[in-house]
Image (cartoon, helix red, strand yellow):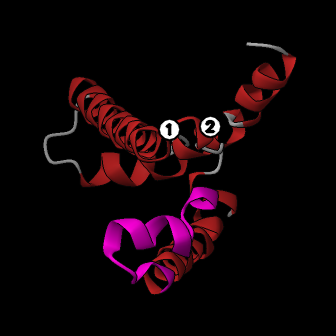
Amino acid sequence: MGFAGFAAALGIMPVIGTAYMCHFNIHEIGRELQGYSETRMYRVVRYSVVACTAVYVTVGVSAYVMFGEETQADVLSNITASTLSGLLGGGGGGFSNTLKVMYTVSLVVTFPLINW
């Protein structure tokens, strides 16, 4: 891996950091946890990090299997009408746009939680 590959890999670190940033919820989760103890709280955190990692690995591996060497750093950039039409039999444009709109809505409603 040359410098360009290293720079691209380094460029995804903020995305990964944001994905795992749940510190703003930890006090609420602790308050709602019945029979609160540090041991139970550590277990909740451990399970949530494992679940998040499993989702990210699944999406990453699936994207690589689907797009191969042409997989881009932003997987949504790979999801176009032409790439999905082969998989969905011609209805890729609407599905592609729906996925992108859903992702945008997810970012819009998550942004206030992360920043305030």
* In the image, residue 91 lies in the stretch drawn in magenta: yes
The foreground one among 107 and 79 is: 79
- Residue occupying the point 45% across, 39% down: 60
Judging depth in this view, the residue of 99 and 115 nearest the camera is: 99
Which residue corresponds to the image point at 58% horizontal and 60% vertical from the top-left?
76
Q: Position of residue 21 (x, y in %)?
A: 55, 42
Instruction: Check the picture and name the quadrant holding the N terminus.
Output: top right
Residue at far right of view: 3
Characterize the local packing of mark 2: few (<14), some (14-19) or many (20 or more) Cα atoms within 10 angstroms. few
Picture residue at 50% right of the left edge, 38% below the top = 68
Q: Is residue 103 magenta?
A: no
Quadrant hosting residue 35:
top left
For badge 1, the amino acid type reads Gly
> Which residue matches tag 1?
68
Task: Estimate the x, y position of residue 86 in percent, counting from the top left.
Answer: 40, 67
Please indicate whether residue 74 sits to the left or right of residue 64 in the image.
right
Q: Is residue 46 above or below residue 77?
A: above
**Which type of secondary structure does the marked residue at label 2 adopt?**
helix
Q: CA distance from mark 1 to mark 2?
A: 25 Å
Residue 2 visible here: yes
Q: What element does badge 1 sit on?
A: helix
Residue at numbered disc 2: 17
